[in-house]
Image: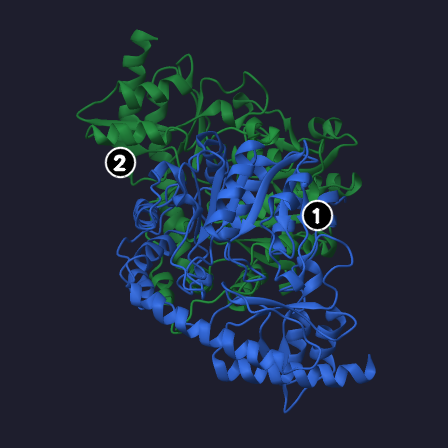
Chain colours: A green, B blue
Amino acid sequence: MKLSKRVQACELSPMRKFHPFAVEAQAKGRKIYHLNIGQPDIATPEVYFDAVRNFASPVLAYAESPGVPSYLAAVQAYYDRLGAHYDESEILATTGGSEALSILMQCILDPGSEVLIPEPFYPNYATFICAAFGSIRPIPTSPEEGYHYADRALIEPLINENTRAILITNPSNPTGVILTAEERQMLLELAREHDLYLICDEVYREFTYNGEGLVTMGAMEDPGENLVIVDSISKRFSACGARIGCLISRNKALMAEALKFCQARLSVATLDQLAAAALYTVDKSYFEEVREEYKRRRDTMMRKLKAIPNVTCETPDGAFYLMAALPVDDADKFQQWLLTDFEDHGETVMFSPGHSFYATPGKGVNEVRIAYVLKESDLSRAIDLLALGIEAYQKIM
Amino acid sequence: MKLSKRVQACELSPMRKFHPFAVEAQAKGRKIYHLNIGQPDIATPEVYFDAVRNFASPVLAYAESPGVPSYLAAVQAYYDRLGAHYDESEILATTGGSEALSILMQCILDPGSEVLIPEPFYPNYATFICAAFGSIRPIPTSPEEGYHYADRALIEPLINENTRAILITNPSNPTGVILTAEERQMLLELAREHDLYLICDEVYREFTYNGEGLVTMGAMEDPGENLVIVDSISKRFSACGARIGCLISRNKALMAEALKFCQARLSVATLDQLAAAALYTVDKSYFEEVREEYKRRRDTMMRKLKAIPNVTCETPDGAFYLMAALPVDDADKFQQWLLTDFEDHGETVMFSPGHSFYATPGKGVNEVRIAYVLKESDLSRAIDLLALGIEAYQKIM
């Protein structure tokens, strides 16, 4: 039996491909500190579980294909507070931000289409684009310049007749970079002038440490039909396991096509949508506490990382990730070795090897993405393990 | 901005495209009897809600990409009871049977690939196949022959160098047809001889009214690498809103590729998987009661339908659907009219127009799919409304 060419061209997730080795290590009794996945340890607000417990209908029925009305209304009210008004018909509930991306790529890409993305980028973008027969044209950045990418002179020459969209993550996963107001304006104008979709993955909106308030591209003056927002409750409310996100755009033609896919998969999970609606009633103080907590984690992280000899990394402004270059030959090999051959007092550590965050071959081989999603004492121990691991690995490298 | 050619070739779901007209009718105070969607009114077993309520972790975390272990174990044990043993690595949890189909088509189809499907078929198959750049080659059937399709002489000439798979639904949605043991054997041999995937959508397994026990193609002698099973808890446990299904196959190469997509979308909803695992502990008596209930509904349905002049339909053996030919010019126009212009004591009725269940142009125009998912008194009233509607529509047709 044949397999499709495109699926064979896709890669396993760099965040998840070491799962089998992790299972083996755990079977040997090892404790693993997970810096590889953006799975926060912050408690999910209790209103989520209350909403789920209070579900009173005897039948767990399909939800409406575009989404449960109370969830769509909650998203709408949240964006209204950010200064961006969307009609309910301009919001589609999705199974996580992941499904929003998957549906979107199927709607806008033909074979040979290109999407401009600053690298390093969230690697699952590559799978969704590859599955839709498109390809990524990377906007190059460098660790030395703090991974900044929003430079018109850098981006515009990369646009060609196959370009369909510019896709950015703001704040960025994996680099923590945040766009300035001028940069956001420039990107929107660029998209408009070249008739491109500007896709903004804003799932880390609440996680900023540079004093900036909550920002959405949707609140810009006249974002028009170019702008498409991908959003999710996963990180905002530490509810990754709910798998609730949304796709937002004023582009009626696009939303009409996206609805076809939403109808084909019938609906998004009913209980999780109702509970997601409840999450949007959480008090502002929740976000302030979470932001402070992550800021402390980031600072601990940077202090400890800078103490390891020959590690290069810049202080990130947002999200809860950073990219770092390690003094090892190959971060992939190093990760595997950490799971199969290394331990300190029965413990080891996981991160995401960096090369899969790049589309340019050869880039990021000695880089890693680190998610600072654990409490400070665990983060501290995890970075100690990383330092011990580097020291031991360098002897056999 | 451009839209992809394939999304523009896809259609809105025939089960859901009248949703806006239904909303308008409801706004006018109309009560609608829904025979258009396979949304049973049977109560979801209480163990589902108990499992959800008993979730005790403070963080609603991502599940494992292949699925929550307890859910995979529950599916495995259920198939063991059916006489089909699968390793846990041969089962992937999916967001409903829908995601299983979507992932599968992306794994096996290249542009130009064909899938053989008996028509009429579940119309969302067409969207998943179209999205993956494939096309459907229909295996023709006729209402007069009760929509039976499993005839080697009929199917084999349709196989060509582009054929990748045969896709069947057993018991069938929309026709209620059930395969005999000989027919199942023939299909498997045919797939094996021509090196094709045999995809069996078995989500209606429990709904048989011909005295047959629970059947899965997985229990056949040596189903080998050709067989792929798509399954779901939606109908089995009346838990459509949970969006929990699975993809099952011994084909290791296929499952390795499918895992790439499972990792890219991170995971399936955590609470719903845990609760789905609990559903598999439901006592056998639950299914016996449900089967008896549907059998009564089918019988009521057939009795009432046969009393309407010039309606053609055969008694279905399984699932909870039937196809019927109505004495109207166009079932699509008729449905719209029922929502915009018809009412009897403030009530009207919805079904799914038949032409979208066919790939052959012009077929099924006066046919409808009816889901007998309501309690007998509601079904009875719904068919009375259909009869009144036909009578009134014939006068203006």
Instruction: Give the residue displayed 67% in from the left and 45% down from the top.
Output: B136
Classify mark 1: residues with Cα within 10 Å, few (<14), some (14-19) or many (20+).
many
- Which residue does the numbered mark 1 point to in the structure image? B7
* Camera-nearest residue between B331 and A248: B331
Q: Secondary structure at mark 1?
A: helix
Residue A380 shows up from this direction: no
Q: Nearer the viewer, mark 1 or mark 2?
A: 1
> Above or below — where is B216 with respect to B212?
above
Residue A72 shows up from this direction: yes
On residue A378, the disc is 2
The quadrant in which residue A392 appears is top left
Q: Name the residue furthest bottom.
A: B345
Q: Quadrant of the C terminus of chain A?
A: top left
* Camera-nearest residue between A213 and B46: B46
* Camera-nearest residue between A205 and B54: B54
Instruction: Judge left or right: residue A216 versus residue A272.
Output: right
The quadrant in which residue B122 appears is bottom right
The picture places residue A159, in percent across and down from the top left corner, at: 75, 30
Chain letter for the residue marked with disc 1 in the picture:
B
Instruction: Give the residue displayed 50% in from the left and 20% down from the top.
Output: A364
The picture places residue B35, in percent across and down from the top left corner, at: 58, 73
